[in-house]
Amino acid sequence: MASGKKGRARMRATWCIALFAGTAAQVSAQQIVDPAAQELLRQQERERVLREQQEARPDVRLKRAPDDGVERLPTNESPCFRIERIVLDGQAADEFRWSLKAANPRQDPAIGRCLGTDGINLVMKRVQNAVIARGYVTTRVLAAPQDLTGGTLTLSLVPGRVHTARFGDPTSARAAIANAVPARSGDLLNLRDIEQGLENFQRVPTVVADIQIAPAEGQGTGPGESDLAIAWQQRSRVRASLSLDDAGSDATGKLQANGTLSLDNPLGLNELFYVSLGKGVFNGAGKDTDSWTVHYDVPYDYWLFGVTASAYDYSQAVAGAIETYDYSGRSRTAEARIDRLLFRNATIKFGVYGRGWWRQSTSAIDDTEIEVQRRRTAGWEVGLNHRQFLGKVNLDASVAYRRGTGAFDALRAPEELARAFDPSIPLEGTSRMKLIVADAQLTVPFQLGSQRLRYSASWRAQWNRTPLAPQDRFAIGGRFTVRGFDGELTLSGDRGWSLRNDLSLALGGGLETYLGADYGHIGGQSARFQSGDHLAGMSLGLRGGWQHVSLDGFVGAALEKPANFPTDYTTFGFSLSWRY
């Protein structure tokens, strides 16, 4: 009896595989379609967009008072003293030797000049401004009365230090200072530490915080010490959102609903926690999707620690020669990630991150697993992040190296097993992948007359060092990659890149219209099975928000595609969301 069930299951699997192969042949004589990979790649893009929205990080840049501009040393002071050396003394002077370079700009050096009172004051001001420019806003540079006949100008440093960080209002004590503000008692007071503290507080969307530098209070205060007085308010610990869009597929359901519940600062550690549930709705019988994502992260000074888990299940009815089969798939992912900000100043933030990940996917026909499609992979990734502010222009960029390993009982990919069975078969993929990924985003707001516009560009790329399994390949074609295509079929390759461009015009009343133009290219060994190697498309849309509701609607069209690459002539899409 059991053997009979297994035989029928094998027959069903054979029919479905033959059906998919036949469909692929009808689509293109060259392109091979893997429905499981297509569905998982589509879900990976949806989850990437969800996480970008839910885990957005604020930027805090505190403005310092501008200096008075370029001043030149006076040339005919009397009396004056020839300055041959400038030295810095005082507590912590060794940590500020670099500031003396500001006294001697190449075009107007102080060394070798005959300086009087005004010239010495300007030298002192230059050094002071250099100290402030690096964020040490309470550290002072002074010139005490001294004998200058020997040619040595001695500047005295009075370091500004943190006495304590405290809440100005007792009701603010629902948040933790220890893991939010990097500065400790006795540390040199630096504006960058205050900015980081504010970002750690305000990374929770329901929190508004401010940090003021106040005179030190209490016993044990010393010269140059200040308190960091923190004002902190949280309007609610709970946020909720609901959304509906048509970003799904015809096979498993176009309409996708999502609900997210967020708990902000639940343990008082300035942490973020959310649960997101997704479901296909109003798609008719034989089409279904279910998904969930859980995320938690907590900051500590310049560190951020986070964990994420997600799941995705889908099913579709496939008409066979004799009967209709239920083709289904499921995937599970988990990751742990650590971020560290290594450097920041008034215009640049530079950091590093590392993460470990695990992923498993299976497919089934009428609840009987297709064992040759079972995949379980794990690995690690290390990367660099860079953010820069050029006036009103924002630039974000990152690059990372991803490596698959045998951790957590990872399985060899089916492509590897096929190669082991027949060495003459070229290796088409591996669970021990080696991959370089990169992305960059540019935002440029500008104005033409009275019209406010914004140009934004998003570039993503990957380069493979090994053949890649279908779920790891770079895919283009659809609203999350190259717009203007319905997303039912994509081009994918071991390596590739895409560029999305948007020009937005503010209409007022919370509305803006945008024009998008995108291009994508794929390459690598697996690209030979595709019907082409590039796509170009455009979109025209309108988006806006009113109170708790936001809407995005667009129309798109393909500009360039392979002749035998099927897609709708015109694509339409929408996304409707409510947030509280």
Image (spheres, grey):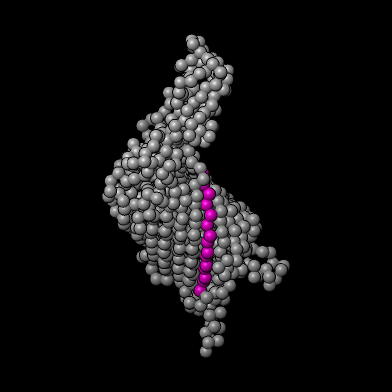
What is the x, y in percent for residue 201? 37, 48
Q: Residue at x 56, y 18 (%)?
A: 150
Q: Nearer the viewer, residue 131 or 23?
A: 131
Q: Is residue 284 left or right of residue 509?
A: right
Q: Quadrant of the C terminus?
A: bottom left
Q: Is residue 107 left or right of residue 175?
A: right
Residue 495 seen in the figure: no
Q: Nearer the viewer, residue 206 or 194?
A: 194
Work out whether 266 lies above or below 513: below
Magenta stretch? 350-364
Check if residue 343 falls in the magenta segment.
no
Q: Residue at x 42, y 55 (%)?
A: 298
Residue 307 seen in the figure: yes
Check if residue 360 falls in the magenta segment.
yes
Magenta segment main secondary structure: strand
Q: Residue at x 36, y 52 (%)?
A: 176
What is the x, y in percent for residue 345? 48, 38
Work out whether 211 lies above or below 156: below
